[in-house]
Amino acid sequence: MSQLVRFGVALEKNVLKEFDQLIRRRHYPTRSKAIGDLIRAELVNQQWESDILVTGVIALVYDHHRRDLVNHLVDVQHQFHPRIISSQHVHLDHHHCLEIIVAKGRAREVEELANLLQSVKGVKFGYLVRATTGKQL
Ligand code: NI
C-alpha cells in the first residue's frame, strides 16, 4: 500500500449525516475507507474512458432452451477467446442460466465483448462491471 495522506473535507451538515447513514448501512469501518472507495470507483471509470488495460465482469441471464441464442453466445466468446480469462455457468432453474464472464483487455475490447453478448436476442439481463487490473490504483 502506498503512503497515506490526511486531508480535510468540508461538507454540508445534512450531506455528511446522509453519508454517515449510508456507510453504516454498507458496514464501512471508517469514513476514510468509504471516501477512498468512492474516489477509486471514479478513477476506474476514467481509466475505462482512456482505453487502458482493464478487467471486466459480464453477467448474463438467459433461457437455455433457445439453442440459437446459446450458440450465438458461444460464437461471440470464441471470437474474443484471448480476452476471456474465465467463465462460469450456473443453472438457475429449469429454464434460466446465469453466465459470468471475466475478461481482461483494452477497455474498448471488453466493452465490445459485453455489448455483443448483452444485445443477443433473448438475453434477459446483461450487465458489465467495469473493474480494474489494480495496477494504476
Ligand atoms: Ni444452464
Image (cartoon, rainbow, N blue to C red):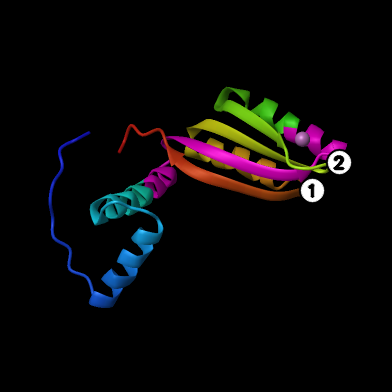
Residue 24 versus residue 54 in the image, above or below: below
Of 92 and 72, which appears nearest the observer? 92
Q: Residues within 10 Å of mark 2 (few under 14, many from 20)?
A: few
Q: If the image is split into quadrants, where does the N terminus sit?
A: top left
Amino acid type shown at disc 1: Gly
SS assignment at label 2: loop
Q: In which of the image's four quarters is ligand 1 placed?
A: top right
**Residue lying furthest top in this view?**
82
Local SS, label 1? loop
Residue ID at (41%, 36%): 52
Q: Answer left or right for 94 relative to 4.
A: right
Label at residue 4: none
22 lies above or below 5:
below
| Residue at left offset 33%, top offset 47% | 40
The part of the chain drawn in magenta is: 44-73
Residue occupying image coordinates x 48% and y 44%: 130
Q: Where is residue 28 drawn, in percent x and y?
A: 33, 53
Q: Say whether residue 136 is magenta.
A: no
Residue named by callout 2: 66
Residue indicated by mark 1 = 122
Residue 89 falls in image quadrant: top right
Precedes in sequence: disc 1 or disc 2:
2
Query: Can you say whether 60 is above or below 82 in the image?
Result: below
Q: Nearer the viewer, residue 116 or 34?
A: 34
Q: CA distance from mark 1 to mark 2?
A: 8 Å
